[in-house]
Image (cartoon, grey):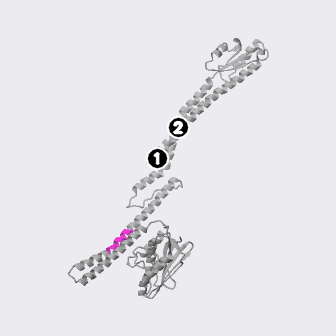
Amino acid sequence: MTHTLRLRLILSMLALLVPTVVIAGWLLLEVFGNRLLRDLDVALEEEATTVAALLADPASADNVAALVARIADETDLGPGKQVAVLQGERVVAEAPPGAAAVIRRGGDLRIARGVTAPAEGGLTVAIGMPATAALHAYWRLRAILVIGVPLGLLLLVAGVWMLASHALRPLEDAADAIERVGVDDLSLRLPATGGADEIGRIVTALNRMLDRLSSAVAQMQRLTADAAHELRTPIAVLRTGLEVTLGRERSAPEYRAALTDALQDTEHLARLAEDLLTLARLEGLPPRLAATAISLGEILQELADAYQPLAERRGLRVTVDADPSLNVRGTAAELYRLFANLLDNALRHAPDAGNVAVAAAGHDGCAEVSIADDGAGISADDLERVFDRFFSGRNETGNGAGLGLNIARAIARAHGGDVRLANRTGGGCVATASLPLA
């Protein structure tokens, strides 16, 4: 892939540079060549005009011949200069001999003329100069461009190829490393480039993606192992009960009792499976805020009313003190599950004839819901461990699966909040869920 990328880079560069260089070289040759010839023409015109001005004063034939010879001997514009002074078709003076005939033929000469006024005899000064020097300079420049431009492009391509190879080396190493990454070994990371350029950012992003992938796979493996461990016991109990029941003939009440126990075990398995599916759906998700604003006061009061019969059977007193204006954005079913788990946990660990206090208030842009009981509290070492899946302490819902607090925290974090536990000074425990206000 990197070879293809380098080749595409070179081809793209050549597609842009070659037409540009060719056009620029052609323009340079045209402008340079025309400029050389134009400069020669201007110099000859100035010289012819100057000589014509000098001949405006009457002079002897010898003086005119000497002036023409001196002008012809000047080599500032190059060798081969031809100078002739004509009066009509008659040659007054010329240098070198035969210059007038050469000028008449023209050929590759650049010719300039200067004319005196008719009053001074109507002399014409013609100066011819071969453009050999200018043409040689033009062809030298052309040769330099024809040889130098391809050579320069070749050196440029080689330099860009080496620079691209060096720049893309981290990507090649990353591709080789990614090829070795497998589900059985997600510990491999790409070699860091140490730079803050685009390649370094890509390598860093890939390493972070591998971190997230490793964490997700570890969570999945842990969830699978935990589920297998937790499902083994109730399935074994259910199977044993059914085998014992079928081991001999029993009366109708005995079969009913056995089926009732089997149904309870099946319901327990169903709840456990539902909890595991909920965790698999919630864990690893980024915080998401639904568009629906939900009243916390209504949720908490409905839950308190739903649990009131259970509380009354044990003589428990449940109180709700929630600001009715508190609204959060979220999914109603998940928020009901969150607070139901926390309330169920508090009710089961509160002593008979005890109290469970539910309160909700706003604080720093968050709604904080506290559910406090006056039970035995939690060991300081277990305040975080109770949120682990299948922890055997207070992390239990009514089915005893040990997933209640874990699910509650997962729901809160999926809504951009969190759940924490703390012991109360006077005894008991308080669970606090914080959620962003709508």
Frontmost residue, 358 versus 73: 358
Mark 1: few, some, or many residues within 10 Å (few <14, many ≥20)? few
- Looking at this view, name the residue that lies furthest to the right: 57
Residue under pointer 1: 5
Q: Is residue 220 above or below residue 46?
A: below
Q: Is residue 195 above or below residue 302?
A: above
Give the spatial CA distance, label 2 vs label 1.
20 Å
Q: Position of residue 89 (x, y in %)?
A: 69, 12
Do the residues under discs 2 and 1 have CB atoms within 8 angstroms? no
- Position of 228 with respect to 214 (left or right) is left
Q: Is residue 345 magenta?
A: no
* Magenta stretch, residue numbers: 222-233
Per the picture, the main secondary structure of the magenta-coloured stretch is: helix
Frontmost residue, 136 versus 289: 289
Residue under pointer 2: 18
Going from the N terminus, do you reach mark 2 or mark 1 first?
A: 1
Type of amino acid under label 1: Leu
Q: Position of residue 193 (x, y in %)?
A: 50, 55
- Looking at this view, name the residue that lies furthest to the top: 90
Residue 366: which quarter of the image?
bottom right
Secondary structure beneath disc 2? Answer: helix
